[in-house]
Amino acid sequence: MSASVWPAVLGRFEWHALPFVRAWENPTLNELIGAGAAAIVVVGAIALIALITLLGKWRYLWREWLTSLDHKRIGIMYVVLAFVMLSRALVEAMLMRLQQATAINAPGVVDPEHFAQLFSTHGSIMIFFMAMPFLTGAFNYVMPLQIGARDVAFPLLNSISLWLTGGAAGLMMISLVVGTFSTGGWSGYPPYTELAFSPGVGPDYWIWAVTLGSIASTLSGLNFAVTIYKKRCPGMTLMRMPLFVWTTLCTSILMIFAMPPLTVATALLALDRYLGFHFFTNDLGGNMMNYANLFWLFGHPEVYVLILPAFGVYSEVVSTFSSKELYGYTSLVLATMAIAVLSFTVWVHHFFAMGQSANINAVFGIATMTIGVPTGVKIYDWIWTMFRGQVRFTVPMLYSLAFMMTFVLGGFTGIILAFPPLDYLVHNTLFLVAHFHNMLIPGLLYGMLAGYHYWFPKAFGFRLDEKWGRVSFGCWVIGFYLAFMPLYVLGAAGMARRTQEVFEPSFRPWLYVAGVGALILFGALASLFVQLWVSIRDREANRVTAGDPWDGRGLEWSTSAPPPDYNFALLPQVRGRDPFYDGKRDGDPYAPPPEYHPIELPRNSMTGPVLGIVGTALAFGLVWHMWWLAILGTVMIVATIIARSFARDVHRTIPVHEIERTEAHWLAAVAAARAIPRQLEMTPLNQGLAAVTR
Amino acid sequence: MSADEVKHPGINLGDTRDLSHRDAEHDLFGFWIFLMSDAIIFALLFATYGVMLVGTAGGPTPADTYKILPAFIETLVLLTSSFTFGMASIAMKHDAGKVRLMRWLAVTLVLGLIFLAMELKDFATMIGDGAYPARSGYLSSFFALVPLHGLHVAAGCLWVVVMMVQVAFFGLDERVKVNLLRLGLFWHFLDIVWIAIFSVVYLQGLIR
Amino acid sequence: MTKPNDSRSQETRGYTIGYVAALVLTGAAFAAVRWPSVGTTATLAIVFALALIQMAVHFRFFLHIGLARSARDDLQLILFSAVIIILMVSGTLVILFNLRHRMM
């Protein structure tokens, strides 16, 4: 081919986009770290493909998982994605702590460009590709079971959301191997991310990964909202829904209305970068302040998208492990709704220092402090739920308790930041970094991990190892305090966030402590993986097939573990707030119905995987200016959607005899299981049947 | 359940056809939420337009750029297409055959294409007169907002074509009907966005 | 229950009323700008008011959004969306105009 063809095919790709080439030509520690990370991605991907091929599992994987429209499998895949991305972003966090601890009047291990990529990817991944998939996965798995539905309202759309999220996360991984990522932080503020200052591919990777993720989240929110509005089982009135369903609903509403501002912000930035528009440029009438405004119109509701699901988990966990009805149900519902609505009214507190008048800042400062009130109500409700309950300190409960104490602490520093004059002092320092980690680690990660331990037995049929769970819990808590409390001190002392090199020797001890904390947090993640390994190894001893290991309260515990494809052989009838808990006390919840009926479920579809892969290819083509790929991707997306609209045979029917067989199998397990009292629930005697005192 | 009970936005098929009212209710509620989410996107582009209206950077101003007559004709065309789509919905609901439905869909499609052609000609004239998007912040915001609506109309036209093919291919089965109802919501929604566009963009710009 | 044909003519009448009302409102808005008789601010207010009325007409006659109990979900959704839109748009305008003012 002639020299003029290559640019048309490869766009702006050239060999130096590969970190291996850069490391070969210039083998500094910095380049070697980059090449090492890229090598892990490449080797990991090859090893995974080889392993699946070796085990001959492609067909199984494709049929049972990748093309599945079952909300339970989609939920599990979301959580797997979250763990993979958590691992990467946590390693990046460790590297950043290592850099700051070693770069006191010294260059440290990574150069400024590389450090900036680290904090940009760490933030983007943790928010969009760890937190969002984790909570979406939890909603997917649990919510339809809790409202007594057989699936979400739009199963195909669910699969498409998963695959768009997966594709966007894949784009983040590709950015490690091909090219470099943005250095503009997770919020991508222009004008720095404009073409004039960041001509490379980095911001484009950020724009398209975030855009794909945000579209996927909008669609997920829509799906969950319709499911909750229209697919509740008979008797499940709004005020009988479990609190986790309420937080799902409020989170979904936030996703529906708060993701579009992000899409607008990234799309306008893309127009600036690709077509020379002037939205956020310095010249010709651009206004970069509007970007901050648009971004935080998304960004603040997003904070509650992240935190409300955890509130839902804690409400379930605290009530179950105290064997008590949730205290103040109505107030918790109202508080959740109040938080959801108020979250749209406080976005300015993310840019108090931009220069608007003191009156505007005051209004938004007051609105910000108001949000503390419903949050406080929730904390009291959880405490009162535990009061005089039969409290068991299981791993999910430990996370809930650690959350309550740690989150309140973070809330106090939030009050400090909500005062505009104080905010001016600590704006853009490590104080802020400490504050939002102090909110999101207990308010998101602990909650998701509590939910993971709580619902894992339901999803896989065996309990997670308790001992390693406690080790991991201890590491997450100690590691958090060691890593982030010093940052409050450093921030108050004036150390700016995102600092690659430090010139103040007195910061040294604090940075060392924070570095040790990061190591412990890494230990926490490692313990989680060890726990998973140990639990799978010992799974036979910890089976809970009967399906109710914790004397559960909601409908999700009234099925086998794992639940059958169709969830409920007969759609349940609900009469109260804790239908299964009351059912166990008032009668026999395991009595088989007089007769079964055939059940219609959605057939598998490859639309999701196709759209995910094509969408990623489109994004990749846009990043590298491979216009042929971008055009091809767009055409393929439209063609796929139109082709799918012609599909008619989209349902399969499960015949009665199959349902009878599945149900009989489960009921035999229930009959064989020994009902255990609560003090034995952590032992192998727990087979998922609760002894009930009437 | 009575035939004229309203369960969802847009025309309600009620029990005049075999389509289960409940399924349509789910599907249309979902689509309606999508439209509201889309409305947020348009709202923010309007807000951005409002912010950037002053950012003309010495280039063309709204009063130099817009012409009242084409905007008026485009509005009439789009309004009429909303009405003709309504007639198509009624034909779908009450007619045994599909001839009248196809005829009204075809009229709607033609009106949509006329609108698009006129709009493209407007843009071409603007760009020819030096009012191109990279000229100023104000023009950037115009060219993000108004063509996005145009893009929606283009997608709507493609959708009409697909639906006409499906009506010919499948007849009026459940999914075709639900999708026609969704398309109806989409089409009427675009008309509402256009009201905002001709008022906020064109008329505001032309007030002297 | 009404006969299908009755409801057909009713529905056709609904769309026709909506169409005529929309034409009148559109015409009035364009006329107010083309042949201005009041000041610019007043004209703008007239245009915006007519636009709001026309939107309501479209919602009522083309999208069949009403106050009937069975359609409450949709009405609530529209009203909530309207609140969010007002919050976002007015917030954006107030903040960014304030910033512009302070930079002048």
Image (cartoon, rainbow, N blue to C red):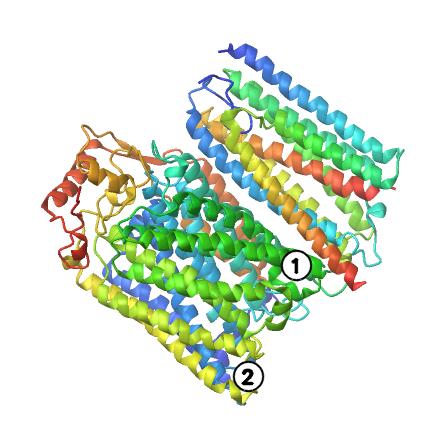
Tell me the distance, in whole angstroms, between the alpha carbons under discs 1 and 2.
35 Å
For mark 2, give the secondary structure: loop
Residue A37 in view (yes/no): no
Task: Give the amino acid at mark 2.
Answer: Glu
Residue A238: image x %, image y %? 41, 37
Q: Residue at x 45, y 56 (%)?
A: A307
Dot 2, how many residues are within 10 Å of its Cα: few (below 14), some (14-19), or many (20+)? many
Image quarter (top left, top right, bottom left or bottom right) of the N terminus of chain A? bottom right
Task: Give the amino acid at mark 1.
Answer: Ala
The residue identified by callout 2 is A501
Q: Residue at x 49, y 46 (%)?
A: A337
In the displayed image of the protein, which residue is found farthest to the front?
A: A388
Number of numbered tags placed on the structure image: 2
Horizontal side of A30 relative to C32 (left or right) equals left
Residue A305: image x %, image y %? 48, 53
Q: Residue at x 17, y 36 (%)?
A: A588
Q: Nearer the viewer, residue A383 or A50?
A: A383
Q: Nearer the viewer, residue A647 or B43?
A: B43
Residue B153: image x %, image y %? 63, 38
Up/down of A228 relative to C90, above or below:
above
Horizontal side of A256 relative to A590 (left or right) equals right
Dot 1, how many residues are within 10 Å of its Cα: few (below 14), some (14-19), or many (20+)? some
Q: What numbered label is drawn on residue A362?
A: 1
Q: Residue at x 72, y 22 (%)?
A: C20
Q: Are marks 1 and 2 on the same chain?
A: yes
For mark 1, give the secondary structure: helix
